[in-house]
Image (cartoon, helix red, strand yellow):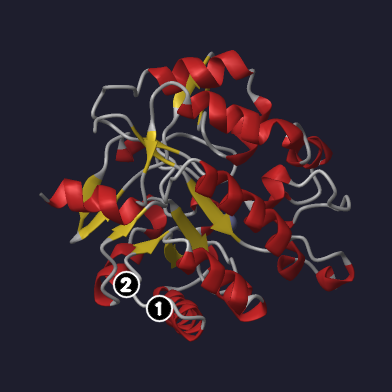
Amino acid sequence: MDSIYLFSIDLEDVRFQIKDGRRYRERVPDNTRRYLEWLRARNFKCTFFAAGDVAEAYPSLIEEILEEGHEIGCHTSRHIPLDRQTQDEFKKDLEANITALRKAGVQKIRGFRAPIYSLTAATAWAYRVLKELEFAYSSSVLPAKNPFYGWPEFGPRPKNVEGVWEIPITVARFGPLVIPPAGGVYFRVLPKFLVLREAKKFVGSGRPLVGYCHPYDIDTEQERFMNPDIGDNRFYNYLMYYNRKGVFKRLDAVIGKGFTVLPYCEYVKMLEA
Ligand SMILES: [Zn+2]
């Protein structure tokens, strides 16, 4: 099996990240179930990186994900980027994330994803915490310059850092931009032929295509509001809603290139073999 697509869902509810966010309609369970259906119909298992507050709000959704045989990893407790936490705060936050997931029925927790790929050279202390809390892997690095977070020096390949495997998100060059072709907003906004061109490079390469989506990435009925991670930038907020209706078609087109979707923990077993 040499064409692996490490598709993943970052399971978070943006309403919990903004002031009075619960005045907006609840959308996460329905949208997550649409991903579950999509995965079930194709007989794929993947990884859901779940924030603690989501596990607390929707424990039965976590159960549904587990029942379908998917992996669940951590995405911090309250979706606070790592550079806004100290090492001690991060450890406490992650412990709370683990507790929330365990309460919802998750037994094995092996993986972590930092909010907004906020694991960079400046927050590399996070690997020590991950090792202490017995995480096997992280998928938290965007190995390029980025307006938000990025760690270009890390390089594109999975690497063991202080006993924890880091599986960086796949990036590709488009003119002056180096961005993730299979990640959330970029996956929706890039012209489809470019996404497919980049995906094809991984077919038969032995290297995994690493990508992610959020519940909101497929949500065409969500109320419009400014998203917390990108501040008040109107252009970025416009992109947040762009082409959500096309996501499943694009996912199918990528899969059609000959990929198998695997949970990250299965891929880590291959790295360790
Ligand atoms: Zn996130």
Q: Which residue is depicted at the point 18% across and 61% down? A: 163
Q: Which residue is depicted at the point 41% across and 47% down? A: 141
Q: Of the residues shown, which amino acid type is indicated by label 2?
A: Val
Does the image show residue 176? no
Specify the label residue 91 is tagged with: 1
In the structure shown, which secondary structural element does the residue marked by tag 2 occupy?
A: helix
Q: Is mark 2 within 8 Å of ligand 1?
A: no
Q: Viewed as shown, does residue 111 lie left or right of 252? A: left
Ligand 1 shown in quarter: bottom right
Extreme residue in the left direction: 273
Q: Position of residue 187 (x, y in %)?
A: 59, 31
Which numbered disc, 2 or 1, marks the residue that appears first in the sequence?
1
Q: Position of residue 25 (x, y in %)?
A: 86, 64
Q: In this view, does 10 lie above or below 260?
A: below
Dot 1, how many residues are within 10 Å of its Cα: few (below 14), some (14-19), or many (20+)?
some
Q: Is residue 252 above or below residue 19?
A: above
Specify the quadrant that holds the N terminus: top left
Quadrant position of residue 213: top right
Q: Is residue 111 above or below residue 208?
A: below
Q: Where is residue 154 in the image (x, y as percent from the top left)?
A: 31, 40
Does the image show residue 13? yes
In the structure shown, which secondary structural element does the residue marked by tag 1 occupy?
A: helix
Quadrant position of residue 195: top right
Q: Which residue is depicted at the point 44% across and 30% down? A: 171
Q: Which of 135 and 200 is in front in this view?
A: 200
Whether residues under marks 2 and 1 lie with C-beta atoms below 8 angstroms apart, the answer is yes
The residue identified by callout 2 is 129
Q: Position of residue 107 (x, y in %)?
A: 36, 78
